[in-house]
Amino acid sequence: MKRITGSLKLLAATMIMVLFAALFFVMTVAGRTALDREEREAYYRQQEKDMVRNVRSFLEEQGLENSGIMLTYVEEENGFREYTLTVHHGDIDRMDGNEQELLAARLAEFSFEDENCSFRQRFLNY
């Protein structure tokens, strides 16, 4: 009887240790996932900031000072981001279609390289 009781205690102690080990593993993975997401968000924030700054400088060089620039994105469940760069300036409104297409192509060059992102440009016309 003592042998069975001792075996049950050992089995119970082993089960508790296995549960604690599993709990620590899950907590570590969950904590790392949250950190990965924070790191990814910081990366994208910096890329977005750099992109807007570079676009603004380019537009100023083209004589389009004080352009309205807005970079927005939609994030899908799988983490893929679709960015839209919207630019407004009265002189762009007065450009013909070919000039606007050329400007859009030049603006596309400022998109940052990321396999989980797509980019498009549009002009806000009044």
Image: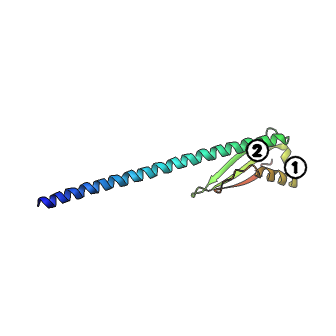
The answer to which image quadrant residue 98 occupies is bottom right
Q: Nearer the viewer, residue 76 or 25?
A: 25
User: In the rendering, at what x and y percent does residue 21 appear?
Assistant: 35, 53
Q: Secondary structure at mark 1?
A: loop
Describe residue 51's horizontal placement relative to residue 35 as left or right. Answer: right
User: Is residue 2 found left or right of 43 in the rendered image?
Assistant: left
* Relative to 24, 6 lies left or right: left
Specify the label residue 34 is tagged with.
none
Q: Residue at x 78, y 40 (%)?
A: 57
Residue position for label 1: 95
Above or below: residue 60 compared with residue 99: above
Q: Residue at x 85, y 43 (%)?
A: 62
Give the quadrant of residue 67: top right
Q: Residues within 10 Å of mark 2 (few under 14, many from 20)?
A: many
- Check whether the beta carbons of the residues at disc 2 and disc 1 lie within 8 A of each other: no
Picture coordinates of residue 118, whole percent (x, y): 68, 56
Amino acid at pointer 2: Val
The residue shown at (84%, 47%) is 92
Q: Secondary structure under badge 2?
A: helix
- Cα–Cα gap, marks 2 and 1: 18 Å
Total numbered labels: 2
Binning the other alpha carbons within 10 Å of mark 1 as few (below 14), some (14 to 19) or many (20 upward) gives few
Mark toward the start of the polypeptide (2 vs 1): 2
Q: Amino acid at mark 1?
A: Met
Relative vertical location of residue 1 with respect to residue 125 in this rendering, above or below: below
Q: Residue furthest front?
A: 3
Residue 32 in sight here: yes
- Coordinates of residue 106 in the picture (x, y in percent): 80, 51
Residue to which mark 2 is pinned: 55
Quadrant of residue 1 within the rendered picture: bottom left
Rendered location of residue 59, percent (x, y): 81, 43
